[in-house]
Every structure is written in structure tokens, then in C-alpha cells.
């Protein structure tokens, strides 16, 4: 599914969300399936939901804590919610697995295609710098990225407009020259509201968000992005 009649023109850089877009956020729970049993799926879903909720709530409360800390707090909630609280070894294992999440199968080829076309590439993520460096290295994406941008210096999470502005300032191009790729609908719409040319990776066939902003296109997989740009 690629929803775009004409190629998106005038793009000089492609900026990707990290967690859920390039990196599979369910991979840690899947890798620990022998320990989690039938709780693997529910735990992964609760973990991710709480992780995002805590970024939004912390931003509204003006009480920033880095993404690694929030990831641990969300995991603690998920373990309690699935009746698996009280196993420090399991918690450590899941956190270490999260630090080295695998990328989606088409991530490397997609970044290669964009780099070969002469476009700048970057990550723009809620993740802390150390988390992002570790994940990009373990997934083999680090050599294909010109920048790995974290919200950490700003001490605020997406969808605050200052986060999206960080991309334009770092890459030194206007918003309309950046293709922003996210599998999180709310993130894609927020980027579009800022002025980025957002491509929503809608892997599950979800309905569009009812939020301000107009995305440039939607697709099912990362591999569709070069085609959307006419490459």
C-alpha cells in the first residue's frame, strides 16, 4: 500500500523516527519468549503503550527524565500488569535486549537506497543518545546515518515542535526539504504540522489520525519510501 499519486519532490534529507519505525519495539519481548510464555505479546504491548504515555505525561508535567529511565519505568508497569513482577534477572534481560533492538528487515536496504541517491539521512528520536547509538550499531544502521538526533538536549519529548525544529537546524534545510518517516501516526502528523513532508509507515492498516497537519503519503513498509520520492 503506497498512497501517493505523484513523487514527493524537492527532498534533500530523510529523517526517521527510531522506535517502532526503524527498530522493532516488540523484539525484546519476542527474544525473551521462552521466559515470558504467553505473556510475551501482552507485555510488549503494555510496555510500549506506557513508554509513550510517560513521555507525554512527563512533558506536560515539566518533569523530564531520559528515555532509558522511562523505558525501565514502563517495563516495571508491564511486568506488574502481566503478573511477572519480582524477577530482577528477567527485568535485566529485557532491558539489555531493548538496548540492542533489531531493525525491521527492510531498514538497511532503504537507507542504502537513500544514501545512494545523495540524500542526507538521520534519526530523530525520543531515545537517549546512548540508547540510539547502541541500537544503530547493533542493527547495522550506524554507517548509513549522517546524524542521530535525540530529544535529550532539549529536555522535552515529541510531539513538541522544538523536536522537529532540531532536524531542520542540524541538517540546515527547510522543513519542506525533509521527508520525515514515522510509523507512529501521531508523530507523522505532528511532523507534518511543523512543515515536514511526513510519510506514515502504516504497517497495520490503521485509520488516519484526526490531528492537525497533512501528511505527504502513507506506506506499509520502509522499502516504499525511495519509490515515494521517485528514486
Image (cartoon, grey):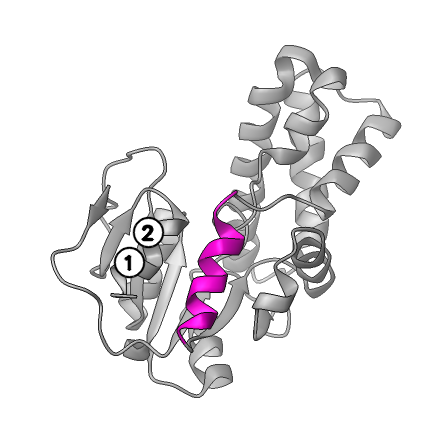
**Left or right side of 46 for 173:** left
Q: Residue 148: percent from the left, percent from the top?
A: 60, 69
Q: In the rendered structure, which segment of residues is drawn in magenta?
A: 105-117
Q: Residue 152: percent from the left, percent from the top?
A: 63, 68
The quadrant in which the C terminus is found is bottom left
Q: Which residue is mark 1?
A: 227
Please identify the dominant SS of the magenta region: helix
Magenta run includes residue 197: no
Viewer-proximal residue among 125 and 66: 125
Circle 2 packing at 10 Å, graded few (<14), some (14-19), many (20+), is some
Q: Is residue 35 above or below residue 102?
A: above
Single out the residue that lies furthest toward the left.
Answer: 5
The quadrant in which the N terminus is found is top left
Residue drawn at x 47%, y 47% as measured from the top left: 106
Q: Which disc number belongs to residue 33?
A: none
Please tell me in which quadrant of the rendered image residue 207 appears. top left
Residue drawn at x 31%, y 70% as measured from the top left: 196
Q: Which disc number belongs to residue 224?
A: 2
Q: Is residue 42 above or below residue 145?
A: above
Single out the residue that lies furthest toward the bottom.
Answer: 172
Q: Are marks 2 and 1 in contact (CB under 8 Å)?
A: yes
Amino acid at each position: 500500500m503506497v498512497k501517493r499519486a505523484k513523487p514527493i519532490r524537492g527532498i534533500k534529507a530523510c529523517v526517521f523516527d527510531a522506535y517502532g519505525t526503524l527498530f522493532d519495539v516488540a523484539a525484546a519481548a519476542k527474544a525473551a519468549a521462552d521466559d515470558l510464555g504467553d505473556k510475551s505479546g501482552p507485555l510488549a504491548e503494555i510496555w510500549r503503550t506506557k513508554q509513550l504515555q510517560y513521555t507525554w505525561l512527563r512533558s506536560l508535567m515539566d518533569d523530564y527524565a531520559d528515555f532509558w529511565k522511562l523505558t525501565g519505568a514502563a517495563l516495571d508497569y508491564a511486568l506488574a500488569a502481566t503478573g511477572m513482577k519480582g524477577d530482577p534477572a528477567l527485568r535485566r534481560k529485557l532491558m539489555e535486549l531493548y538496548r540492542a533492538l533489531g531493525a525491521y528487515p527492510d531498514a538497511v536496504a532503504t537507507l542504502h537506497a537513500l544514501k545512494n541517491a545523495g540524500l542526507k539521512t538521520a534519526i530523530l528520536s525520543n531515545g537517549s543518545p546512548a540508547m540510539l547509538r547502541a541500537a544503530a550499531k547493533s542493527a547495522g544502521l550506524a554507517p548509513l546515518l549522517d546524524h542521530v538526533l535525540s530529544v535529550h538536549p532539549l529536555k522535552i519529548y515529541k510531539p513538541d515542535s522544538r523536536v522537529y525544529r532540531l532536524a531542520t537546524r542540524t541538517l540546515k534545510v527547510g522543513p519542506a526539504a525533509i521527508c520525515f518517516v514515522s510509523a507512529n501516526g501521531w508523530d507523522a502528523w505532528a511532523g507534518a504540522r511543523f512543515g515536514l513532508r511526513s510519510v506514515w509507515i502504516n504497517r497495520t492498516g490503521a485509520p488516519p489520525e484526526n490531528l492537525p497537519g497533512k501528511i505527504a503519503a502513507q506506506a506499509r513498509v520502509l522499502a516504499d519510501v525511495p519509490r515515494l520520492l521517485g528514486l
